[in-house]
Image (cartoon, rainbow, N blue to C red):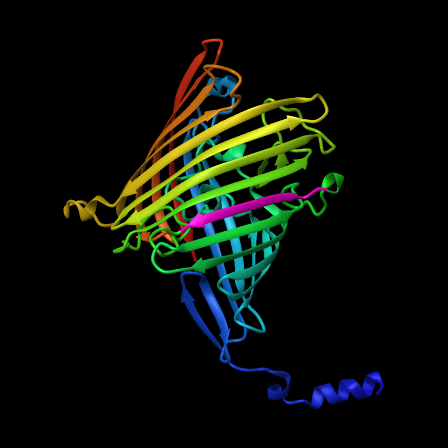
Amino acid sequence: MGICSASALYAQQSPDTLGTQAVDIRYGSQGFEFRTRDGLFSLQLQSRLQFRYVTPNDQNPLTFDDFDVDERQMFKINRARLTVGGHGFQPWLKYYWQYELAQGNLLDFRIMVEKWPWFNIKVGQWKVEYNRERVISSGKQQMADRSIINRPFTIDRQQGLSVYGRLRGKGAADVSYWLAALTGNGRGAVTSEEAELMYVGRLQWNFTGQELEMAGSDTEYQRRGRGTIALAAATNRSPYTRFSQSGGGSLEMFEAADTSRYRVQQWMIETAYMYRGFSWQSEFHWKQVNDMAFNRSASLRGSYWQAGYFFHYLWKRIPRPLEMAFRYAAYRPDLKVPQNLQQEYTLAANWFFKEHQNKLTAELSWFTFEDRLLRQADDLRFRLQWEISF
């Protein structure tokens, strides 16, 4: 059959033959959703904006020099995101991508095969399931942003493949797992150096018999406690000693490299719990960086503890939408160096207009640094943030 004949036959086909059908439209927690009547195709579209006022500086201090910057006031659009997700052909064949409009970055793009609860496959680019603080979306955080230990320990976004699932037994015999093989060079990197991959594993015990949502506040008022204990580990060889949304980068004690100079090994243990307006989460991290070029290494350690509560459930005069939260974080950049400690104390108040989709956060942080030269520095920071999704 020639091209003209094929085109004519295609034009004569009815809409039903082509699979065209009515689409239902609704609005929910994932934004606008378009779904075919047979349930085989869906598309969720959501935009998210984050407005922030801060003084004197928005970035967490990294060195003693950061405490000497001039005080200033800033107002900015901190994040502007467009997210698209849904499923196609079958309800278990899912897709998702996320674009940062303010910086012009494609952050996430992935396909998930989630046919069975106990075994799923994901391919693409995403925030690796390593630690809770980083995996929680910036729109569902309890604080305005993540703690001082996020920068040195996060694996952030990587490209690769992952298998994951949930093994449900009776009662406390409930476990979730994630195993991933990744390029290990950060967001946007499609190849790995030295033909080596990054390997990441996470094992999570859902000791209450239920999974806990990746969110920072108990806005749903869990009437049954939900909690998890997780252990994760990662190994990688690349030119980088840390990762962020921008991709691969370098810790302060290591210079940038253009070859796979650094072998990085790390692990962490994490706890989280929510019950009747109370929320808790904590992480303990250890990381070792080996400089293969100069045969030297450094070990890092960090941790944080964070809790929040809707005090309305204790005293009815306090407004229901108000949550108070506190976080303490400690970071030691080099365990070989005594009196080498960075600390963060953060107090936050959240007002939830519509759960995490529309909330206002006021946050006050106090940072303290000290080192072996007996230098000390401290500073206060205030941030006010409005998070809203459509």
Q: Is residue 303 above or below residue 389?
A: above
Farthest residue, direction right: 2
Q: Nearer the viewer, residue 14 or 293?
A: 293
Residue 132 rendering spot, x and y as whole percentages? 45, 44
Residue shown at the point (43%, 13%) measured from the top left: 376
- Quadrant the C terminus occupies: bottom left
Residue shown at the point (25%, 45%) measured from the top left: 310
* Residue 317 at least partly seen: yes
Q: Is residue 116 above or below residue 142?
A: below
Residue 74 rendering spot, x and y as whole percentages? 45, 33
Q: Is residue 69 above or below residue 52?
A: above
Q: Which residues are magenta?
A: 196-205
The magenta stretch spans residue 198 = yes
Residue shown at the point (63%, 37%) measured from the top left: 248
Residue 383 rendering spot, x and y as whole percentages? 38, 34
Label the magenta part by its dominant secondary structure.
Answer: strand
